[in-house]
Amino acid sequence: MSLESKLFKGDAKLETAARQDSAHVLLGASGAHVLKIQSALMLLDDAKIDSGETEQSSYGSSTAAAVKAYKEKRSIINHSYQTQADNIVGKMTIASLDQEMLKFEKSEGNRLCNRDENRSTSANTIPPL
């Protein structure tokens, strides 16, 4: 499965996490892929992630808590070996985040385009997502 959202599509680490269990994104990870996960959580769930973690693109305790809350809210649990949500971004989690981001991008894009069409001047246009 390839990721479809603009936010995640083409990110090698996230694409691999979507396909391979060995590529789960875990507490302690860092990089652009972590910042993308944090951004999605903040946009989709209004997650409160420590600014130090987002500034350093690091998967710390507040990111882990946001991931767990996201998964609990949506019952993202692999019932073959889990009884409750964890704080790991694996295949099921990245697939869910990607699909929700895709819907978010489409709805926000439409909302922004509609707002822009109703403006009388082009000086106040909203930049594309």
Image: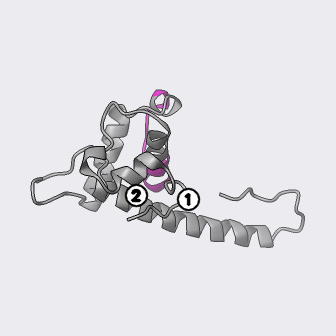
| Quadrant in the picture for residue 53 | top left
Instruction: Name the residue located 55 percent from the left edge and 59 percent from the top edge.
Output: 6
**What segment carries the magenta color?**
39-52
Q: Residues within 10 Å of mark 2 (few under 14, many from 20)?
A: many
Q: Earlier in the sequence, mark 1 or mark 2?
A: 1
Magenta part, dominant SS: helix
Up the image or down, 105 lies above or below 93; here it is: below
Up the image or down, 63 lies above or below 97; here it is: above
Residue 106 position, x and y percent, is: 57, 69
Image quarter in which the N terminus is found: bottom left
Up the image or down, 18 lies above or below 1; here it is: above
Residue 93 position, x and y percent, is: 32, 55
- Say which of 90 and 52 sits in front: 90
Instruction: Name the residue located 36 percent from the left edge and 55 percent from the top edge.
Output: 94
Q: Which residue is mark 2?
A: 97
Q: Which residue is mark 1?
A: 6
Residue 16 position, x and y percent, is: 37, 51
Image quarter in which the C terminus is found: bottom right
Label of residue 63 in the image: none
| Magenta stretch contains residue 91 | no
Q: Amino acid at mark 2?
A: Leu
Which structural element holds mark 2? helix
Instruction: Name the residue located 12 percent from the left edge and 53 percent from the top edge.
Output: 82
- Say which of 64 and 1 sits in front: 1
Q: Residues within 10 Å of mark 1 (few under 14, many from 20)?
A: some
Q: How is the image coloured?
A: one colour
- From the viewer's perspective, is 54 left or right of 92? right
Which structural element holds mark 1? loop
- From the viewer's perspective, is 113 left or right of 5? right
| Magenta stretch contains residue 49 | yes
Q: Amino acid at mark 1?
A: Lys
How many numbered marks have been drawn onto this rendered protein structure? 2
